[in-house]
Amino acid sequence: MNFRIPAKGNVKLEKLLQRIYTNEELHQLWKCANMNAVDRSGINDHGEIHIRIVSNAALKILRLLVKGGVEPSIVKNYGMAVEDAEVAVVLAAFLHDVGIAVHRHNHEQYSLLFAYPKARELLTRIYEEPGLTILTCEVMHDIVAHNAKEVCLTIEAGVLKVADALDMSQGRSRIPFEAGKVNIHSISAQAVDRVDIEKGDEHPVKLVIELANSAGIFQVDELLRNKLQNSSIKDYVEIQARIEGEMERRLIKDYNL
């Protein structure tokens, strides 16, 4: 793997990451997921690059929430530590799309088939019972709740749901679109230049979306807003979408019906 996640002194997270970086089965699951998504279905990437973006975004959002006084659910409900919440969110990010190796449709459900044994395998000897089962169940909930319409019962699940939507810059929209097809999905995806996660002005987290063209508002409104509104962290996040400069970039020359 050619990316790293900042453990920042979290020993349990560091041990987990070392196992993930060398787990050949997990790496192949990402490749199989992308085979079904990109090569066979002609839609956007769901492989290793997506995993890198989501895992880093989820960890950054969670840490900003904690700094802003938001208590993770695993701490509130089970008396565990913030470091354990980081482990749950990162592992869920690594496993949330592996079900696409079976099929894109209902992939959240298929992901559970792979994720339950893989999560227990990766967490064994890092956690003992009952912590091992608690962490595994939390990861399962995070995965199934990243579906836009599914209710998030934990802070951590909301973090993953929003982080998943943030992989939208430079044509990487989480709204599936067919490669080469010209419509609002593909055009608006090209209109998002950059996504930044910052400390908020009035809330713990601010999501700054830089657009090259006003068409990108579709991505913010249809994708990000919808996922945020159906998450557990909507009251802690603010969104700012802006177009830099006075001129908008032309995204298409002609559109013919």
Image (cartoon, rainbow, N blue to C red):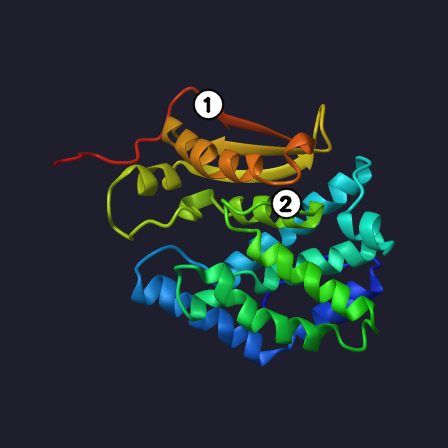
Disc with the residue nearer the chain's start (2 vs 1): 2
Residue located 69% across and 63% down the image: 137
Where's residue 10, x and y in %?
Answer: 82, 60
The residue that disc 1 covers is 245
Nearer to the camera, 17 or 174: 174
Residue 22 in view in this figure: yes
Q: Amino acid at mark 1?
A: Gly
Residue located 60% across and 63% down the image: 94
Residue 4 in view in this figure: no
- Image height check: is 88 above or below 61? below
Residue located 47% across and 44% down the image: 168
**Disc 2, disc 1: CB below 8 Å?**
no
Where's residue 138, x and y in %?
Answer: 70, 59
Q: Which mark is residue 201?
A: none
Identify the image quadrant of the C terminus. Answer: top left
Residue located 43% across and 46% down the image: 173
